[in-house]
Image: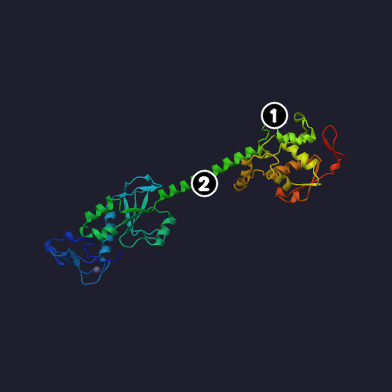
């Protein structure tokens, strides 16, 4: 906005601001007994009918009207004992309605930690600061300090009043504007609002943590959940994977070796009975393997890409995501590695040295102990020394 110098409607008489409308006919000219509020030169009251009534002085005193308005506004707050505060709003909700603040203590030019708000008002319990803005808004440095100290600071904006209403701006008129209106007021900083923002953010964090915990709990459940999805009945014997496997092994599903029915953490990743996938892997990769070693990478690819065994895709897809969230559900490679480690403990396999130093189970490798010596002895497969 282009700043214009308004004709001065205020004079200072006996240290009180007087509005030009309060000057009577017989007090025209120097008889008004007023001085300029800024430069203290004597003022002449111009109250003729032809032009806007105002005070005049010889000096070029461009900020006189603004300064006088600012002074009068401060006087009004100092002389009152209540002021209407605007509501406090957060996230489209009014967290504190507009309300009169009753104060018994008011001070102007109150210094607090390097800043000087125009006014400080207090009821003995709560302290508010007030900035009265006519044409100069609160500068950034002051604003930062207010935020940093978290002071509740109310801004009373008189710019519009200055340009539109100053000619009517008697003390009473301005008093009504400052004390009893709220549209010209806003919070530069408000403790209650900051608290609400903080609570909201904390709640957000809490919700996020809760969601994470829920996922972790679920993952933990899955981790311990056995994948004996099928009851021990004849149906398993009709399962196509089992049938395929068992054409070489001729095992009895109800009387299976311990190492082919071994609970493995995270085995829920297989969408079939543990006995099926363990027996299948044992048959294909230990007994009937044409190489002398097993790589997890092969087995994993065979299961996933060649659809060698049924996979629970939901679980398969979720382990990556949850590795990011902090709880690592075993991957397919982890489950396979654990299973082959068990077979190593039973003496069928020998883990490659890489297994001890490499965390990525996908790269693990196991040697098959002299295959020719793994024989069926009627009790199960065993190793001949
Ligand atoms: Zn002046």
From the viewer's perspective, tell me whether residue 177 is left or right of residue 147: left
Q: Position of residue 331 (x, y in %)?
A: 67, 44
In the image, residue 208 lies at what x, y percent? 53, 45
Q: Label 2 belongs to which residue?
A: 205
Residue depicted at x 35% and y 61%:
137
Image-based side of 171 in relation to 104, left or right: left
Mark 1: C-beta under 8 Å from nearest atom of ligand 1: no
Furthest-top residue in this view: 233
Residue nearer the viewer, 346 or 185? 346
* Any part of residue 162 in sight: yes
Q: CA distance from mark 1 to mark 2?
A: 48 Å
For mark 1, what is the residue? 235
Of the two numbered discs 1 and 2 in the rendering, the one whose residue sits closer to the viewer: 1
The image quadrant of residue 96 is top left
Q: Which one is in front, 374 or 56?
A: 374
**x, y percentage for residue 241?**
72, 36
């Amino acid at each position: 906005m282009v700043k214009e110098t308004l004709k001065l409607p205020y004079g200072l008489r006996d240290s009180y601001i007087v509005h030009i409308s309060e000057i009577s006919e017989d007090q025209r000219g120097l008889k008004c007994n007023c001085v300029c509020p800024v430069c203290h030169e004597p003022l002449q009251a111009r109250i003729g009918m032809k032009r806007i009534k105002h005070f005049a002085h010889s000096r070029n005193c461009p900020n006189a009207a603004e300064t006088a308005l600012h002074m009068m506004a401060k006087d009004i707050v100092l002389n009152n004992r209540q002021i209407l505060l605007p509501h406090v709003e957060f996230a489209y909700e009014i967290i504190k309605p507009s309300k009169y603040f009753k104060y018994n203590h008011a001070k102007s030019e109150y210094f607090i930690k390097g800043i000087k708000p125009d006014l400080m008002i207090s009821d003995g319990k709560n302290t508010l600061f007030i900035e009265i803005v006519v044409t100069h808004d609160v500068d950034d440095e002051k604003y930062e300090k207010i935020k940093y100290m978290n002071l509740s600071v109310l801004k009373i904006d008189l710019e519009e009043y200055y340009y539109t209403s100053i000619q009517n701006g008697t003390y009473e008129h301005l008093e009504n504007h400052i004390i009893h209106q709220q549209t010209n007021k806003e919070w530069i900083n408000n403790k209650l609002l900051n608290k609400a923002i903080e609570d909201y953010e904390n709640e957000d964090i809490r919700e996020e943590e809760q969601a994470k915990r829920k996922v972790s709990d679920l993952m933990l459940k899955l981790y311990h959940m056995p994948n004996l999805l099928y009851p021990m009945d004849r149906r398993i014997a009709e399962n196509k994977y089992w049938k395929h496997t068992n054409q070489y092994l001729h095992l009895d599903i109800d009387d299976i070796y311990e190492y082919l029915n071994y609970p493995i953490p995270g085995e829920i990743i297989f969408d079939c009975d543990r006995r099926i996938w363990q027996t299948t892997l044992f048959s294909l990769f230990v007994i009937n393997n044409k190489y002398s070693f097993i790589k997890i990478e092969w087995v994993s690819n065979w299961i996933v890409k060649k659809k060698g065994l049924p996979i629970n895709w939901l679980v398969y897809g979720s382990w990556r995501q949850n590795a990011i969230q902090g709880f690592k559900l075993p991957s397919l490679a982890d489950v396979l590695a654990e299973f082959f480690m068990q077979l190593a403990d039973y003496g069928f396999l020998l883990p490659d040295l890489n297994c001890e130093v490499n965390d990525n189970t996908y790269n693990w490798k196991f040697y098959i102990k002299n295959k020719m010596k793994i024989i069926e002895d009627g009790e199960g497969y065993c190793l001949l020394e």
